[in-house]
Image (cartoon, grey):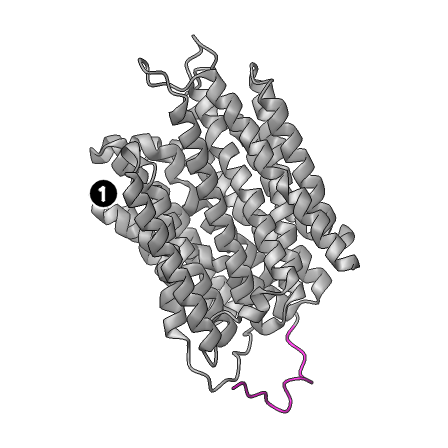
Amino acid sequence: MTRTSPSEGARSPVRLGRLPIAALGVLALSLGALQSVVEPALPLLQDELGVSPGEGALVGNTLLITGAVITPVAGKLGDRHGGKRVLIRLMAVVSAGGLLAALAPNLPMLLLGQVLQGVMVGALPLSFILVRKHLPPGESQVAIGVVVALFTGGGMAGMLFAGPIAEGLSWHWMFALPTIAIIATTVAVSRLMPHDPPALTDDRIDWPGVVLLSGTLLAFMLGLVTVTRDGGLPPLAVGAVVVVVASLAAGWVTVERRAASPMVDLRVLAKPAMWQACVLTFVITTSSGMVLFLLPQLFAVSADGYGFGADTTDIGLFLLPGAVAGAVSDSVGGLAVRRFGSRAVVAVGSVATAATMLALAWLHSAEWQLVLAKVLTAFAAGVGTTALLAGTATAVATKDIGITTSLLVVTRVIGVALGAQVAGAILDAGAGPVTGLPAESAFAAGFAVAGLVAAPALLVVRLTKRGAQG
């Protein structure tokens, strides 16, 4: 049962100034850099640690799995105990993981560091709590877009500088430098950011709900990672994974319905603004995940055939304009939803993505065509998902900001992971029996499917608009 102090409704929160927002933004920038350094340096890590590509892939997947599991828990704890308090503690865990990865002598220690670093994904909903509590709705939408944009920009910086740092110093330093920045900016956030009061409640934490939701996400992410690895799982094993995930999800729903103080109030989740945002985010990010996987693969295909024979540095440069577009789109998303509304923003982004991917299925014979496609789809996906985040953060009650936005962040992670797996399966199905390399038609099919996946967002927007009018 929630208790509210007599003066709570009349007391105005401390308004955020530029320095606290700047500190929060630089922290997001540093986290984005630490998250992204592995991707361009993965071949180097495999060579240095003497591991296979399959083992090396675990480095990136481990962070993704941890992030999906911890994010809703972090959001709920932020709602209950205050966003700043939980954010500082979370950053202590991330810093420990970054330092452990920087000092890791072997793969197991590096994986442990990645497990700890994975909790960084929970920093986004905690940042949204702080922004929403200390700024009016219109300004908080813009601030949320800026924070997400800086996180994306940090990812861009990490991808660009990971290789030069690893080759000029060592791969250890590509983990150490962002971690040092995270430690410094966490201290700044601790000193500059005003405290947000925790919820005054006598209710206990819904630990069964926490465990079941975490178990559901963990089973889903592990199943998603393994289902197409090394030839995939046999049909019986795939069925078993589906049954386990469905059983855990059903158990979680049952517990939440009966809990006096549920981890996720299913009534909030059932609100149109929330479930529509989840569906649209999932559709957008699934299509985006396919693009993220397909384009680097096509750039790397030998120039003797239909590809371009690009190496790691060239691929990074080809993808750079798209990364810039993604960072810009995240900041624009908050402004766009404030002016046009999330439905209009998502509709335009879905049209742009679907049209671009369907066109790319036919036109992919020049580098500029792929670069332009990456720019358009990154901008459209960034604007759409940030608009949904910002719109949801201002549509729900303040006490539910952390858990609702964290569920959207998890939806983004799951969508990107699923899109990459689907794209990988399409390329595997189109591989030649002799070379093992995907045929050009497999890439064309992948781009077409990515466009078709983006299209249902228009249907969702149309149906929800009718529902709102009715």
Q: Is residue 282 magenta?
A: no
Q: Is residue 339 left or right of residue 141?
A: right
- Residue 342 in view: no
**327, 223: nearer the viewer:** 223
- What's the residue type where badge 1 is placed? Leu
Looking at this view, is 215 or 195 the one in front? Answer: 215
Task: Give the residue drawn at x 46%, y 34%.
Answer: 160
- Of 351 and 45, nearer the camera is 351
Residue 41's x, y, as percent?
A: 36, 34
In the image, farthest residue toward the bottom: 6
Q: Residues within 10 Å of mark 1 (few under 14, many from 20)?
A: many
Find residue 56 and report its horizontal and vertical position in percent. Answer: 28, 37
Tell me: residue 142, above or below residue 2.
Answer: above
Residue 362's place in the image compared with 292, above or below, is above
Residue assigned mark 1: 107
Mark 1: secondary structure? helix
As for residue 12 lying within the magenta part, the answer is yes
Q: Is residue 415 left or right of residue 302?
A: right
Residue at horizontal 55 percent and vertical 74 percent from the top: 196
Magenta-tinted stretch: 1-14
